[in-house]
Amino acid sequence: MKVGILCAGDEELAPFLSVIKSCRVTEKAMLKFYEGQIDGVEVVVLFSGVCKVNAAIASQILIDTFGVESIINSGTAGGMNPELEIFDTVISTEVCYHDVAADILTEFHPWMKSVFFEADCELTKLSKAAVEKMKPAGKVIWGRMATGESFITEEGRQKIQDVFAPLTVDMETASIAHVCYVNGIPFIAIRCVTDTAVHSGIDHFEENCTRASVIARDITVALLKEIS
């Protein structure tokens, strides 16, 4: 199986570069795709840039040009659930947009039964087996993620919680899941928390992002071992 690993930013991509064997780089649509193997699994790894459209562009290229058979979204996120702390990790069971009208997805293409894109059951199962065999920093929790292109204010945070009750928020995951859904490609997201409502992380965001990206990488690599 060839696996696409999609990160939003270069800091989230960076930890993967040292573990890709026989790496070769291809450029397309102003993006760099790193092809090679991780633990015997054929992978194509990249960072798409922040926002839904950038992530969707990268996802479709992974499928059409590189022929990936599944996509793992690896990186960082903001914690929404009050039980989450910085450097805890959330693995998606389902993903939604918090800034898209519900009937856009259910009444029009892709005519979904609900607003939630479900993570692949087999990848979820393998992710649990992977985590059991390692000792990641912080807790690992499986649950819902929400995506939208806005910085979360306190007022906005409560509205998102009331409607969707996600564990985390970010700006890319749902769009990646959306592309995978319409292409019939298995998907899962692994996002490590860099900030929460209680701990904004602003003063140490770059440091937090670096460490959180490594944690997400380690869990992603552990999942690849299970896939292999």
Image (cartoon, rainbow, N blue to C red):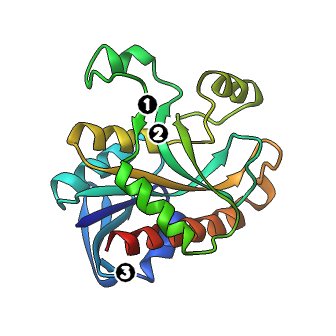
Work out whether residue 142 or residue 48 is closer to the camera in this orientation and state it: 142
Dots 1, 3 in contact, CB < 8 A: no
Q: Secondary structure at mark 1?
A: loop
- Residue lying at 43% horizontally and 31% vertically, measured from the top left: 116
Provide residue 30's location: percent of width, then percent of height.
Answer: 30, 57
Residue topped by disc 3: 20
Q: Is residue 61 above or below residue 19?
A: above
Q: Residues within 10 Å of mark 3 (few under 14, many from 20)?
A: many
Kindly identify the amino acid type of the residue bearing the numbered disc 3: Ile
Q: Residues within 10 Å of mark 2 (few under 14, many from 20)?
A: many
Q: Secondary structure at mark 2?
A: strand
User: In the displayed structure, does residue 18 sit left or right of residue 210?
Assistant: left
* Image quadrant occupied by the C terminus: bottom left
Dots 1, 2 in contact, CB < 8 A: yes
Query: Where residue 94 is drawn, which disc sits there?
Result: 2
Provide residue 96's location: percent of width, then percent of height.
Answer: 47, 32
Disc 1 to disc 2, C-alpha distance:
6 Å
Kindly identify the amino acid type of the residue bearing the numbered disc 1: Phe
